[in-house]
């Protein structure tokens, strides 16, 4: 059998890429293997191109190759893979209708930019008209001289002089006579044309001088001088200056992108840019108020690498930092980059009015508009089955971002709002008229009420879990609250929104903090499936102010300006800073702009809708009207006070669990015993650790004046230790005094 053809190209069915298929020659195989292969493949004939058809199920042929593996097999691409490739290609295609024509706001922004661009160019050149006129006037004499010279050369038929000289040098008499005759004819005709043109020019000039008004005469003279000046302008110079456009209106081109990517300090990018091997997978096009470039980065370079040096990229593009936004495309591959460069910085872009500002209502089971991205598109947020964490330095829009979410919650009349604004400045006061529970300030009284509300929500959590567990499977197939269940008032499964602004005031409190953190952690973990949403805002994202059990379970995270990497990773998740998400690069003017995680597959840049106090009052009034119509106003909004706690006497309960033989006892042990004595009253203490029970018991004894101090006791292991506790005698004394006072009064 003859040798098999080698290195013949095989075409891929989808990509159209020609790839070599290298098969071993029969002569290269051992003799037994060669005979076996020849017998096995004797029915396989080469096709018209000389390529051998290899059967993929030929296992015996593989055995005889004795470990030789054919890596690049000539197999067709599976149908499922082909469809996946086609889907990817579809996502990369530019839209049929340009993005700027898809909405009134985008079209208005495009027209505004075009008008600004045209106005800038007109103003630039208008102010330089005197300079242009002087430039043309200075060059007009030279233009006249050049015009006379060029006309004379044309009339003399200078361009045929080398041809005439060549015939003389060759002594070609016949050719010379023919060329000379043609030369005379051309010169005679051109003289006539020039004479006619000169006569027309003289007559026209006389007519203008005699019959035309003065402005026409001066205009004609200016036009002639301008033409002569333009003719006299050297090729390496120009009449009109090229306007140096502001960064926001410079067009993005492939050369600009390639140069910028090659200058940001990434070695592989620099090599690819030097060889002009940056792959643009789509034309650079306008996308909202800016331009978009889709790039496949070199092998081994990721979009995160470019995002990490965004400041260098902005420098290389000569654009403001707030206008340059490299973005990943996670559904493609880590090396796919979308580079979006705005006409102006994001903070300067005009933001459209919030869609729910004057009309409409929200549904927490559906997405509602929160803010706009760098392209001016509205970013939807779906709060149901999620929790949100908002953090930033003071005065950068944290509370305003929280206010937008709460306004949407208020416009869902089925939602129950429990709001605690612990800053004390009244930023959420407009929502007091629709809140079931409300508190403002960081006083001990407000913090105690907030803790009591957490206990109420935790109890509601347990009740809802029992209700859902008892529902038939056809009504609750996924064991979570649905819109239908929420609208069934008898079940009490309506959306419940618990919002705490400046939550560090509660979680970092020495006495209330441990219990509050424990309750909040339980609520944030189990609440979403039960229709309970927690919204937290803080300016101190450390472990003490924001326990990790809480921050780790916030599905939506909004980070405005922070100081550095630690704060970024605590808010947005570990590795966010390393992947190029840098809220620390926001400037003092970037208020309201944030990086958000949990709203899409990739982090999003968002600018919260701006709702000032007056606007918020108007929205809250409309929300109250919706609730009045639906009959869902309750609690603080209609003047109701929280239901009183179950009647109990703490000091009497302490004496019930502390025997006379225990002169002094640790707070933690008393709290554990009380939780067993009255689970309905003290049951929340059972889930706390030793230190947290100590703090909770200390806070409970303080109003009664029980002295708490260091008490020596014995651990379960038998070792002695000092812990915070109290003397039983102090409690007995206080109870006796209270009885004497009651007896005297009675």
Image (cartoon, rainbow, N blue to C red):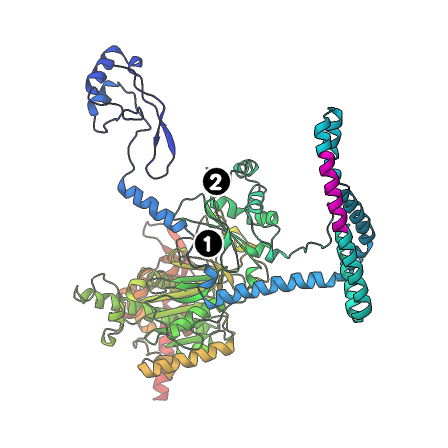
Span shown in magenta: 179-194
Q: Tag 2: Cα neighbours inside 10 Å, few (<14), some, or many (≥20)?
A: some
Residue under the point 82% across and 69% down: 210
Q: Quadrant of the N terminus?
A: top left
Q: Quadrant of the C terminus?
A: bottom left
Query: Can see residue 398?
Result: no
Question: Which type of secondary structure does the marked residue at label 1 adopt?
Answer: helix
Which quadrant of the figure has residue 43?
A: top left
Report how far apart the C-alphas of labels 1 and 2 lie in the structure: 26 Å
Magenta portion: prevailing SS class: helix
Going from N to C along the chain, the mark reached first, 1 or 2, is 2
Above or below residue 746? Residue 320 is above
Question: Which type of secondary structure does the marked residue at label 2 adopt?
Answer: loop
Residue for badge 2: 301
Query: Can see residue 275?
Result: yes
Residue 204, position as x, y percentages in the image:
77, 62
Residue 224, position as x, y percentages in the image:
77, 58
Q: Is residue 182 magenta?
A: yes
Residue 262, position as x, y percentages in the image:
57, 41
Q: Please give left or right for residue 424 compared with residue 471 in the image.
A: right
């Amino acid at each position: 059998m003859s040798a098999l053809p080698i290195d013949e190209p095989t075409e891929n069915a989808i990509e159209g890429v020609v790839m070599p298929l290298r098969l071993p020659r029969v002569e290269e195989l051992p003799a037994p293997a060669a005979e076996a292969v020849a017998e096995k493949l004797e029915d396989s004939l080469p096709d018209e191109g000389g390529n051998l058809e290899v059967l993929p199920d030929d296992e015996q042929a593989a055995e005889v190759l004795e470990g030789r593996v054919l890596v690049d097999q000539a197999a067709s691409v599976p149908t499922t893979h082909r469809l996946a490739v086609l889907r990817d290609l579809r996502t990369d295609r530019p839209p049929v209708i340009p993005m700027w024509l898809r909405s009134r706001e985008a079209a208005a922004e495009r027209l505004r930019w075009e008008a600004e661009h045209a106005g800038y160019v007109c103003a630039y050149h208008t102010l330089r008209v005197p300079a242009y006129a002087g430039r043309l006037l200075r060059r007009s004499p030279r233009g006249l001289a050049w015009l006379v010279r060029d006309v004379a050369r044309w009339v003399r038929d200078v361009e045929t002089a080398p041809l005439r000289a060549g015939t003389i040098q060759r002594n070609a008499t016949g050719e010379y006579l023919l060329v000379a005759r043609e030369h005379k004819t051309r010169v005679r005709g051109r003289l006539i044309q020039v004479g006619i043109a000169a006569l027309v020019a003289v007559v026209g000039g006389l007519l203008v001088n005699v019959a035309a008004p003065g402005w026409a005469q001066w205009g004609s003279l200016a036009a002639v001088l301008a033409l002569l000046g333009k003719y006299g302008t050297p090729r390496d110079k120009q009449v009109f200056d090229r306007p140096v456009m502001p960064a926001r209106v410079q067009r993005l081109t492939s050369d600009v992108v390639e140069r910028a990517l090659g200058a940001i300090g990434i070695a592989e990018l620099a090599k690819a840019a030097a060889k002009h091997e940056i792959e643009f997978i789509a034309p650079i096009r306008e996308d909202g108020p800016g331009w978009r470039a889709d790039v496949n980065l070199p092998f081994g370079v990721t979009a995160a690498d470019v995002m990490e040096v965004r400041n260098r990229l902005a420098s290389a593009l000569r654009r403001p930092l707030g206008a340059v936004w490299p973005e990943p495309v996670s559904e493609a591959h880590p090396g796919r980059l979308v580079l979006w460069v705005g006409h102006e910085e994001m903070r300067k872009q005009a933001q459209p009015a919030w869609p729910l500002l004057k009309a409409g209502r929200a549904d927490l089971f559906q997405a509602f508009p929160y803010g706009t991205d760098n392209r001016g598109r509205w970013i939807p947020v779906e709060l149901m089955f999620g929790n949100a964490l908002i953090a930033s330095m003071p005065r950068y829009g944290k509370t305003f971002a929280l206010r937008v979410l709460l306004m949407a919650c208020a416009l869902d009349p089925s939602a129950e709002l429990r709001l605690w604004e612990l800053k004390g400045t009244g930023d959420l006061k407009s929502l007091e008229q629709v809140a079931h529970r409300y508190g403002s300030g960081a006083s001990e009284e407000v913090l105690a009420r907030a803790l009591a509300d957490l206990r109420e929500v935790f109890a509601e959590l347990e009740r809802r879990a029992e209700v859902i567990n008892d529902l038939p499977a056809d009504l609750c197939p996924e064991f979570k609250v649905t819109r239908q269940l929420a609208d069934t008032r008898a079940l009490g499964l309506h959306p419940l929104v618990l919002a705490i602004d400046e939550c560090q005031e509660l979680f970092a409190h020495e006495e209330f903090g441990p219990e509050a953190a424990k309750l909040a952690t339980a609520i944030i973990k189990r609440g979403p499936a039960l229709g309970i949403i927690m919204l937290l805002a803080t300016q101190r994202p450390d472990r003490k102010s924001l326990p990790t059990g809480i921050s780790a379970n916030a599905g939506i995270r909004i980070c405005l300006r922070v100081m550095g990497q630690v704060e970024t990773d605590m808010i947005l998740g570990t590795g966010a800073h390393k992947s190029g998400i840098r809220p620390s690069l926001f400037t003092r003017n970037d208020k309201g702009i944030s990086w958000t995680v949990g709203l899409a597959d990739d982090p999003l840049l968002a600018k919260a809708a701006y709702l000032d106090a007056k606007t918020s009052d108007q929205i809250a009034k409309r929300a109250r009207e919706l609730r009045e119509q639906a009959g869902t106003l309750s609690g603080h909004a209609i003047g109701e006070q929280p239901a009183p706690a179950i009647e109990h006497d703490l000091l009497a309960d302490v004496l019930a669990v502390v025997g006379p033989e225990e002169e002094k006892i640790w707070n933690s042990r008393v709290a554990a015993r009380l939780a067993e004595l009255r689970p309905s009253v003290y049951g929340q203490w059972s889930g706390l650790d030793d230190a947290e029970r100590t703090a909770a018991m200390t806070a409970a004894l303080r109003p009664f004046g029980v002295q708490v101090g260091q008490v020596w006791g014995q651990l379960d292991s038998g070792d002695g230790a000092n812990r915070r506790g109290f003397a039983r005698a102090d409690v007995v004394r206080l109870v006796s005094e209270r009885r004497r006072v009651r007896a005297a009064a009675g």
